[in-house]
Structures are given as C-alpha cells and as structure tokens.
Image: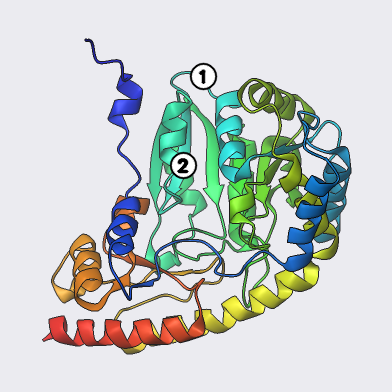
Amino acid sequence: MRNFISHKAASIPPSGIRRFFDIAATMDDVISLGIGEPDFTTPEHIIRAGIESLEAGETHYTSNSGILELREALSEHLAKLYGVHYDPEKELLVTVGVSEALYLALTAVLDPGDEVIVPQPCFVSYCPEVLFAGGTPVVVRTRVEEEFQVTAEQIEAAITPKTKVLLVGYPNNPTGAVMSRERLLEVAALAKKYDLLVISDEIYDRLVYDTEHTCFPSLPDMRERTILLQGFSKAYAMTGWRIGYAAAPAEILGAMRKVHQYTIMSAPTTAQIAALQAIRHGEDDVQAMRAEYDRRRRVLFKGLNSIGLPTFEPKGAFYCFPKVTHLGMSAEDFCEKLLYEEKVAVIPGGAFGECGKDHVRACYATSLEKIEEALERISRFVEKYAR
C-alpha cells in the first residue's frame, strides 16, 4: 500500500514540548513548570453561565461569526481598552481558540511562496502554521541583550519582494518579553513602507507587569493592515473552553470567515456564552489572577538568578527564560536530567526556535508553594553540575 501521508505533513516535526510532558506524566511527585496553562480554575460565575446555557437548551449552532451579543461586547472591550474600533458584524469573528484564528488568518492571506517574517523565540505553532498555509517562514532571531524584543533593523534586513506578512506575538511565549511602544512604532513604519500585513497575536495582553501593553492596530495607520488575534484562555483561565477571536478589516475578515465556515461552522455555543459572561463581568478575576502571577513572577525571576541561572526580567505572560548552557550541557540535556534527577519539568528553549537553544522555559502558572519547592530542587541540581 502506498504512503498516504502528504510531504507537507511528514516534513513538519511534532511539537518539541510534548516529550517532556509525556515523560513527566509517568512519574510521581513531579513539579511542572512546563505547561503554559493557568493553574486557576475558570471563575465560578463564568462556569455557571456555561452550565445555565446548557440547562436552557442552548445547544445549537450560532452564526458563523459567533453570537452577535458577544461580538458587540468584544467591540466595546477593545474600544475601551485600546481605543480601536471594530464593526461587530463585519470585522469580528469568534474562533475555536487563538490557534484557529491563526490558522484562518494565514490560510486566508497567503499564496504559495509568500514569505512571512517570524521573530523567534516564538510560540511553537507559528512556523508550522505558515508552512501548512503554503507560505514560507523567514525567521528573525531576537536576542536576550535586547530582552528578546525584535528590532525594526532586523525585520527590514529580512524583507524581500516576496514578503507579505509579519507575524508577531507580544507579550511573548516563551520569553515573557513585551515590546515597547517606541519599538512597535518603528515596526509599524516598516509595515507601511513595505506594504506588509501584520498578524499580531496578543493573547497575553492582560498579563503584563510594571509596564503597559500596546495593541498593534491602535498604532497610527495600522488598523487597516493588522489582523488582531485574541482570546480568553490565559487571562480568564479558560484554556479548555477553546474560545478566541480575530479582529480585522472587513475584506480580510470576510476571507477568514469563509475558511471558518467550511472548516469549523461556528465556535462552541456554550463556550461563547461563558465568554460573554467573562468579558462583561470578569474584570475583577483578571486583576486578581494577574496580581498573583506577578507575585510568582518576582519569586521565580529572583530565585533563578540567585541560584546561577541568568534570567532577564519578563514583563508579560507567565514565563521565565533562563540560560542554562553555561553548566556544560545542552538545554535538552538540562531538561531531561532535571526531570529525572529532581523531578522538575521545564521545556528546552530550542522548541521555540533555534535562537532559544541556550535557554529553557519555566512557567510560573503554578502555586507559589510549588515554585519555591521547584527552586530548591533546581538549586541542588545547579550546584551539583556547577562543580
């Protein structure tokens, strides 16, 4: 029988973060700083809204674009936070998480051979999704010396006549980096100069510390050339609900909606109703969780540096990105040895791009008690190999 797997699917390796989760799942007493998921349960009033929708028999399809009431609330939310306005009927689309929104965006705008500039380290799906959509990812390597903020000079050096899209994700997974408004303005000027579309993944926008988040389409002249990707997973602790959204100019969003219609139909009705409750009444929950993440961030950042793992201060999301290769082993070896010897799970930075290969990702979306215990175990490990 012939090999039925496509060359495209066969050529893309599986996610580099799964192996350590699979190993950790077979072990007892593991402290996981690996998975990028809130440890908080979805707030009770949001859960209750979902349950009540089921009990009321709201179990049918919604509009392809999502419940209009939710889109109207999202439009008001973005206008209030960032002063950027979207028509809820033509410019907002509710999706199955930001992952679907990214797929729709790339599929709707890329033709074969179009180049997409992707600053790395970045979320593991960016480059594979570009390839699945028929595009060519062009990697730009950010540096710890710049706190992993991509520069306009780096982007301009990567632009060719085939460049169509700039795909950026800040606050950043895995580094915790946040782009300053000044640097984003420089990037925006490039997008205008070279007539580029920007896909801005801002799923961590509500989780920033000691700084402010700048929403890319709110910058001058950027609304009409930006696809904004957003969702509920991180700030509202709703990962399992799989609910996100995209905002874009009507023509672009119409193309995305067409792909969505044929691929998904509509996002889950129950999740949409829960999301409406979250956006209307969940602000206190967001602020409480953000404050707790900030507390954990300070402990992990200070702790990693104090035990000899150089770590720049993350200003967003819920990750630290310490350097580990000065201990005489690769990041892959560090993660494997740490897991087996001290039962602490972290993720090798190379899973997020070649420029992250000297680092590991440690997530502080777990209890402070577990973070403190993990630091004790990592300290023993570092002391052992530093000798």
> What is the residue that sits farthest to the top in this orientation?
1
Q: Residue 172: x and y, percent?
A: 51, 59
Q: Please rate how many residues cluster around mark 1, counting C-alpha atoms within 10 Å: few if below 14, some from 14 to 19, many from 20.
A: some
* Residue sitting nearer the eye, 365 or 149: 365
Looking at the rendered structure, the secondary structure element under dot 1 is loop
Question: In terms of image quadrants, where is residue 232?
Answer: bottom right
Point 44% across, 27% down: residue: 132
Q: Amino acid at mark 2?
A: Tyr
* Residue sitting nearer the eye, 180 or 102: 102
Left or right: 102, with 268 as reference point: left
Left or right: 131, with 46 as reference point: left
* Residue sitting nearer the eye, 8 or 321: 8
Q: Amino acid at mark 1?
A: Asp
Estimate the spatial distance between the alpha carbons at disc 2 and disc 1, rounded to whole Å: 17 Å
Question: In terms of image quadrants, where is residue 283?
Answer: bottom right
Give the number of the disc on residue 5.
none
Q: Is residue 380 visible?
A: yes
Residue under circle 1?
111
Q: Is residue 216 above or below residue 363?
A: above
Point 49% across, 74% down: residue: 366
Residue under circle 2?
126
Q: Is residue 300 above or below residue 186?
A: below
Say which quadrant the C terminus sits in.
bottom left
Point 67% across, 50% down: residue: 231
Q: Is residue 308 visible?
A: no
Q: Residue 56: x and y, percent?
A: 86, 45
Q: Which of disc 1 and disc 2 is earlier in sequence?
A: 1
